[in-house]
Amino acid sequence: MEKTKLSRRGWLKGTALLGLASMGAETLLASQKPEKSVQNKYTPPIRFAVSSYSYWHFDKIKYPIEKVIDNASKLGFDGVEILHRQMESEEKTYMNKLKRLAFDAGLALPMLSIHQSFVKPDLEARKKDIEHTKRCIQLAVQMGIPCIRMNTGSWGTGRSAPDYYQTGKETPLPGYTDEDAIKWCIDGLAECLIDAEREGVILAIENHWGLSSNIDYLERIYMALKDNPSMGLNLDTGNYVGDPYPQFERLVKYANIIQAKTYYGGGVYYDLDLDYQRLGKIAREQGFKGYVSLEMEGHENPDTAVPKSLELLKKAFNG
């Protein structure tokens, strides 16, 4: 009888030890497997907007933004960037209509692009552009737009030169220096940021020729104000003087949004042959996650050039 009990105990003990050994082996094997979460790390795709400017290059007759929204929905864009100068009015009924059309089409309105300049020696002239910016902040709020494209501005002494878009050269007005202009930009933006922060709108300064052709200046202005939660940066792929790639790489880590230019049919102002595979790779490596907004700036009919541009950008930024 006792022999039977001992035998049973031995069997149970052996089974338990075998189970523990098996568990240990499984643990060892599991520890040798690569982390599943690392293997399957999710990278959200870049979203694409189209600027209403892509359909209207300041011609006499404005291309309706309502039609841009309709086109964008049919083509598979995620949003529409609105060019302020292309708006038919600033009436609330008009702005509400654009907001509703975008919502019904499943589109975001990520940015309102405005024109202003702080590179003006006259204080009253700068104040007018500050007030213009503050008014545009309210327009953005009305349309549910979280970001406004800002410019530094220009001395206005170089645009007539045939090589302006290759060199970006401008001479300061007599009696002034670029250092004066940098201070005016910082001070003007700082005043606008008070309203922007209160309303929850980002002011994204762009490399938009003029003073910002020098990205050292652009970076200084941005860095002086970057601690304000409403300060942002918009990078335009087509607005660099010289080799665009190292300049883009240097700044894209700060960028909230990218404007991507294409030039099908030849550029309206100048031509560039941009390597978007390279730009997309740089953006991904630098961790960019914001919108890429298309600015088709070529002579080709946008009905054919815009779809081609979207396909190009999707392949470049999302692989």
Image (spheres, grey):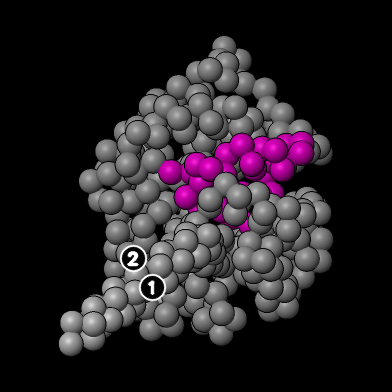
Considering every residue shown, the one lying at the far top of the view is 175
Residue 289 numbered tag = none
Range shown magenta: 232-260
The answer to which quarter of the image holds residue 226 is top left
What residue would you read off at disc 1?
A: 18
Q: CA separation, marks 1 and 2? A: 68 Å
- Determine whether 97 is above or below 274 in the image: below
Task: Identify which residue, 300 or 201, lies in the foreground.
Answer: 201
Between circles 1 and 2, the one closer to the viewer is 1
- Determine whether 15 is above or below 227 in the image: below
Magenta segment includes 242: yes
Secondary structure of the residue carrying tag 2 is: helix
Residue 143 numbered tag = 2
Q: Residue at x 44, y 75 (%)?
A: 107
Task: Identify which residue, 253 or 176, lies in the foreground.
Answer: 253
Task: Identify which residue, 150 or 292, lies in the foreground.
Answer: 292
Q: Residue at x 23, y 86 (%)?
A: 4
Q: Residue at x 31, y 80 (%)?
A: 11
Disc 1 residue type?
Leu
- Image location (x, y in percent) of residue 234: 52, 47
Indicate left or right for 278 with 290 as reference. Answer: right
Q: Earlier in the sequence, mark 1 or mark 2?
A: 1
Disc 2 residue type?
Met
